[in-house]
Image (cartoon, rainbow, N blue to C red):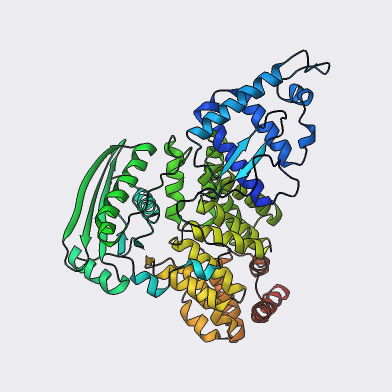
């Protein structure tokens, strides 16, 4: 049953929280995208103007005269008593809103109305989610405990084999697998474990036995993809891990387009869950979310696949190239929520995980704005909230980042990349218990994880002055090594008195830049470390910097 947070007669108050304003803007965009409004330019302009004015605390300006000038381009001598355009259009707007909420918007979380007798809108907040979201949830309450994992059947998803002849097409198979995983994790009655590409064996039987042992998964989804020009074929098989019995197998032939790919992902997810979850209890309703831009644009869809393929660890050139591509796409498809989230995450990457790190303020301001835009368009976009986590955390607003982390994990507690990244931030903040729990949960959801996952436990080890452990576990450093490893390795070597080894690493990755370490230290400061960790790191770097300065003077 809907639970109202404000009555229909309550106007937008200047004291409305930032989160509620975001929710109202998301609802406005949802309404304006509906067919009742999509082709009515003035009606859309009318509704947007009065909503934005009310949210800005200027509801008292919303008179017939002001609306006539601002929305309908009437001259300054406009007389709303003689020219009834505002009253007439307001009546039509009320009727369209009634139609919208009796149809497509009947389950929307916010009801936006224009009460008769005034032009200032009112907003009724309703709680109607099919599953209750946790209230004031702690991060540790949003991740699976070992006991909870045992209650759900485990599904291991192997990365689809790429059988395409086209060079450089691996991203397509890996990205499509990630999209299938994203569809599957919306079903809360199964536990999904994503197996990265380098998990392989000499036969399916060996693969499945290994998976039973390593990942405690009862079922395996595997297959292949072959793309040739505008046509692709996907073969999938759902197997009982212990016996190798095939429960479901199908070949899908499709024309290469985002709509076809979305339908394919949903079809695979629905078939798999119907087979697996039915014996174990109720299957959740599958929420097919609108993905404006991705559904109508091949480049937009491929940009998302490229992002998934990077696995949160691109190199600088990849990040810049994808950032420019996605920027152009969001300019063309202004409601491309995931596109804005990806742009935000890449801006954070450029300032917090790269040397040189660019202009911190420009990148973080852009990241915050883009991430907010993502969640305004789609309040259910977990990636958008994760982008807000990163932007806020690296800008020093840790408490706000915590709230965004709770939202992101509440929407998708199975996203191993999000879990692992937040585990890293928690390690820097000295929150050992949370960091270790998040790290363990991430490892339970992915086979052969990306190397940067180890930044969290190694940061905790470094904070405990276990410098030998840090040095041993970070075996080699090259230009593509995650910057967190560079921070820890160089500082550990400094504490161990192995300055020459540290200098050799800098010579290799710094490309002759004598100030590489100083630039890296600036980037380190974007990670909100505890005073103890910060001091330990600088103590370790100090002898290395002294040796660099001695070189310059020689």
In the displayed image of the protein, which residue is found farthest to the top?
82
Residue closest to the eye, 144 or 516: 144
In the displayed image of the protein, which residue is found farthest to the right?
77
Q: For residue 502, which quarter of the picture?
A: bottom right
Q: For residue 27, which quarter of the picture?
A: top right
Residue 508 showing in the rendered view = no
Residue closest to the eye, 43 or 350: 43
Query: Which quadrant would the C terminus be assigned to in this image?
Result: bottom right
Q: For residue 90, which quarter of the picture?
A: top right
* Percent x, y of residue 248: 20, 53
The answer to whether residue 61 is left or right of residue 522 is right
Residue closest to the eye, 263 or 164: 263
Residue 537 showing in the rendered view = yes
The answer to whether residue 115 is left or right of residue 423 is right
Asked if 522 appears above or below 118 in the picture, the reply is below
Residue closest to the eye, 520 or 93: 93
* Percent x, y of residue 420: 49, 67
């Amino acid at each position: 049953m809907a639970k109202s947070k404000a009555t229909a007669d309550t106007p937008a108050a200047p004291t409305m929280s930032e989160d509620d304003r975001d929710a109202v803007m998301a609802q406005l965009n949802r309404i304006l995208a509906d067919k009742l409004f999509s082709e009515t330019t003035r009606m859309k302009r009318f509704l947007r103007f009065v909503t934005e004015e009310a949210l800005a605390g200027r509801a008292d300006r919303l008179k017939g005269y002001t609306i006539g000038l601002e929305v309908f381009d009437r001259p300054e001598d406009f007389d709303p008593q003689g020219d009834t355009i505002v009253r007439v259009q307001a009546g039509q707007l009320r009727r369209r809103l009634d139609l919208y909420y009796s149809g497509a918007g009947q389950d929307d979380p916010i009801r936006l109305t224009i009460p008769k007798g005034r032009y200032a809108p009112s907003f009724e907040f309703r709680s109607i989610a099919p599953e209750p979201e946790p209230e004031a949830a702690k991060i540790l309450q949003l991740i699976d405990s070992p006991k909870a994992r045992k209650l759900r059947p485990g599904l291991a998803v192997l990365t689809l084999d790429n059988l395409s002849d086209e060079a450089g097409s691996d991203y397509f198979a890996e990205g499509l697998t990630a999209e299938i995983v994203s569809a599957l994790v919306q079903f809360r009655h199964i536990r999904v474990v994503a197996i990265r590409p380098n998990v392989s064996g000499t036969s399916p039987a060996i693969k499945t036995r290994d998976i039973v042992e390593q990942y405690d998964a009862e079922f395996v989804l595997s297959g292949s993809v072959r793309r040739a020009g505008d046509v692709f074929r996907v073969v999938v098989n759902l197997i009982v891990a212990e016996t190798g019995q095939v429960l479901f197998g199908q070949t899908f032939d499709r024309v290469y387009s985002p709509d076809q790919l979305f339908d394919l992902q949903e079809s695979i997810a629905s078939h798999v869950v119907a087979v697996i979850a039915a014996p174990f209890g109720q299957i959740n309703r599958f929420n097919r979310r609108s993905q404006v831009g991705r559904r109508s644009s091949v480049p937009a869809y491929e940009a998302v696949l490229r992002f998934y393929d990077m696995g949160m660890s691109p190199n600088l050139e990849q990040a810049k190239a994808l950032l420019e591509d996605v920027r152009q796409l969001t300019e063309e498809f202004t409601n491309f929520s995931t596109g804005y989230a990806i742009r935000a995450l890449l801006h954070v990457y450029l300032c917090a995980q790269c040397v040189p790190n660019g202009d911190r303020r420009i990148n973080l301001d852009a990241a915050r704005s883009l991430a907010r835009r993502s969640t305004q368009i789609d309040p259910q976009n977990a990636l958008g909230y994760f982008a807000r986590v990163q932007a806020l955390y690296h800008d020093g607003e840790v408490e706000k980042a915590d709230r965004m982390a709770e939202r992101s994990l509440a929407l998708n507690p199975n996203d191993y990349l999000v879990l692992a990244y937040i585990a890293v931030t928690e390690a820097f903040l000295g929150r050992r218990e949370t960091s270790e729990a998040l790290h363990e949960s991430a490892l339970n959801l992915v086979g052969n994880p990306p190397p940067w996952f180890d930044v969290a436990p190694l940061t905790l080890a470094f904070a405990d002055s276990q410098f030998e452990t840090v040095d041993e576990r970070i075996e080699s450093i090259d230009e593509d090594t995650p910057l967190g490893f560079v921070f820890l390795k160089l500082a550990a070597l400094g504490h161990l008195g192995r300055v020459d080894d540290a200098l050799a690493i800098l010579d290799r990755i710094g490309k002759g830049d004598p100030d590489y370490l100083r630039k890296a230290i600036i980037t380190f400061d974007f990670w909100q470390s505890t005073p103890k960790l910060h001091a330990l790191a600088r103590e370790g770097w100090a002898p290395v910097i002294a040796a660099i300065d001695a070189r310059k003077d020689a």
